[in-house]
Amino acid sequence: MRCLKVAFGMEDDEHLIDAHYGDSEFFAIYEVCEDGSVRLIEKRPNKAKDFEEEDEGHGDPRKFKAVVSQLLDVDVLAAFRMGPNFLRIRDKTNKVAFFTRTRDLKLALQRLIENFDDLYSQVQAKKAEKPPIEE
């Protein structure tokens, strides 16, 4: 069965963060499968949450690497909102970014299931073309 490993940027146990992905309190890592089944694998602390960004403000490339390096084993980065590093995720990693358009985790999981085939295809294409993180 086809499955995806998805990291949701979380504020608490039920809500995705209403801020940049790299500012998440933790990442809820789920296995989401084509049959609609979901399984919480772990709640992974965000070690980059308090990363000091330089004068650039949000979008510091070093913070981007600090966040993505914690999620190398994940296929999809799911968020309510993403900041300037979204383009870096899209262009410089083999990760697929998915905007949930909701902060409610249960609804976000449902939207991921509804888009499973498209997301799975995007993940396969990314894995074929890019390393986990490009310099």
Image (tube, helix red, strand yellow):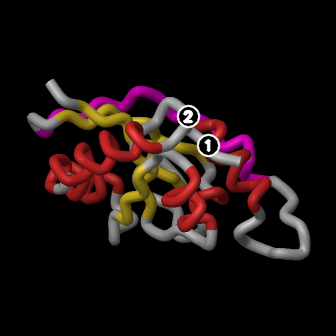
Whether tag 1 and tag 2 are in contact, CB under 8 A, the answer is: yes
Kindly state the secondary structure of the residue where label 1 is placed.
loop
Q: Nearer the viewer, residue 84 or 78?
A: 84
Residue lying furthest front: 129
Q: Is residue 112 left or right of residue 50?
A: left
User: Given the image, on which type of amino acid does mark 2 rest?
Assistant: Leu
Residues in magenta, as a range: 36-50
Quarter location, residue 104? bottom left
Q: Label 1: which residue?
A: 133
| Residue 131 percent location from the top left of the image | 54, 38
Residue drawn where x is 62% and y is 72% of the image: 84
Which callout, 1 or 2, points to the residue nearer the camera? 1
User: Given the image, on which type of amino acid does mark 1 rest?
Assistant: Ile
Q: Label 2: which residue?
A: 72
Q: Residues within 10 Å of mark 1 (few under 14, many from 20)?
A: some
Residue drawn where x is 71% and y is 48% of the image: 135
In the picture, the disc for residue 79 is none
**Relative to 124, residue 119 above or below:** below
Q: Is residue 102 left or right of residue 55?
A: left
Kindly state the secondary structure of the residue where label 2 is placed.
loop
Residue drawn where x is 19% and y is 55% of the image: 115
Q: Is residue 122 left or right of residue 134?
A: left
| Residue 66 percent location from the top left of the image | 73, 45
- Is 96 magenta? The answer is no
